[in-house]
Amino acid sequence: MARKIGILGAGTWGTALARMLAVSGSDVLLWSAIPSEVDHLAQTHTHPNLPGMVLPETMRFTKDLAEVCNGQDILVFAVPSVFVRSTAAKARPFVRYGQVIVDVAKGIEADTLLTMTEVIADELGRADGPRGVRLVALSGPTHAEEVALDLPTTIVSASPDAEAAAIVQEAFSNGCMRVYTNPDIKGVELCGALKNVIALGVGISTGLGYGDNTRAALITRGIAELARLGIAMGCKMETFAGLAGIGDLIVTATSQHSRNNRAGQLIGQGRTPEQAVKEVGMVVEGMNALPAAIELADRYQVDMPIVRAVDAVVNRGMPPADAVRALMGRDPKGEV
């Protein structure tokens, strides 16, 4: 069934999803807060960071936030995590009662420790906001560069509202995208935000010249850290063993498309974190997530040595090689 879908955010992920949904027959309207971005998309039907992708003529574009929010079956938040709150605040007057809202941004808000759907709920739940909005997190091993070319991809539609999760599952499913549902929305969002931190660490190890053994160790022990934190926060272990957990971590920690992996490699090669972000040229969500990751580890008293080592390198000036030595020199312990 064709649906009307408004997408807030015309970065690589928002645009790749918009194209996929339009090709599948949905009526898609794509909005950006950056006027030049909208003009470029409308005139060329291409995206500068998605080579080889052509947007269908059926896709529409707008600079008007009210227009993209009006009359949609599904509203998708695809802005970077640091802009989710401000975008939700600006959209609040235009969001209808009972709106199904999908968040595809991955992050934890640093000062509140809220997930992205919690941030949206907080902003829309103010006195002048709509009531009864139905929030879904859509997350998994999904690089925009591959979705834009119709390569087979799987993803998780997460919500305690089973009907809303199923609505999103149906709307986003097609021959190239297989969608699973999961009621553990906090676990799925926690995975999406914090796997970026582990991927930064994997990239740093690659930049230092370490090999597959190191990469496998960091991925495996990294997901163990995320699962420990998740269980302490009331999430389900199965989520961390699934697509949003180990699946997303594998793709982010190993792919040539991963900004976090690339930024980590540059840091391992000697760039400063600031230089690495500038060279990558796009948002590196793992760096945005680090303060919240450290605070959550402290609040729930969970041992997260890899996360702390990445934080020491990125935010405290520790040389990457010293961080590796510190990790390898920790007291012996059992695996489980």
Image (spheres, rainbow, N blue to C red):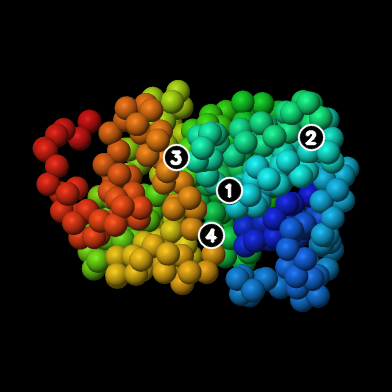
* Front one among 297 and 68: 297
Q: Which residue is mark 4?
A: 283
Q: Residue placed at 74% from the left, 59% from the top?
A: 32
Q: Which residue is mark 3?
A: 292
Q: Element at badge 4? A: loop
Q: Quadrant of the C terminus?
A: top left
Q: Position of residue 303 (x, y in %)?
A: 28, 33
Q: From what the image shows, is residue 159 above or below residue 75?
A: above
Q: Which residue is mark 1?
A: 81
Q: Position of residue 277 (x, y in %)?
A: 46, 65
Kind of residue at badge 1: Ser
How crowded is the residue under tag 1: few (<14 C-alpha within 10 Å), some, or many (20+)?
Answer: many
Kind of residue at badge 2: Gln
Front tag of 3 and 2: 3
Q: Residue placed at 61% from the left, 43% from the top?
A: 138
Q: Residue 99: which numbered mark, if any? A: 2
Quarter of the view holding residue 59: bottom right
Q: Cα distance, mark 3 to mark 4?
A: 17 Å
Q: Cα distance, mark 1 to mark 3?
A: 12 Å
Q: Residue placed at 45% from the left, 23% from the top?
A: 234
Kind of residue at badge 4: Val
Q: Residue placed at 74% from the left, 51% from the top?
A: 7
Q: Position of residue 201 (x, y in %)?
A: 33, 54
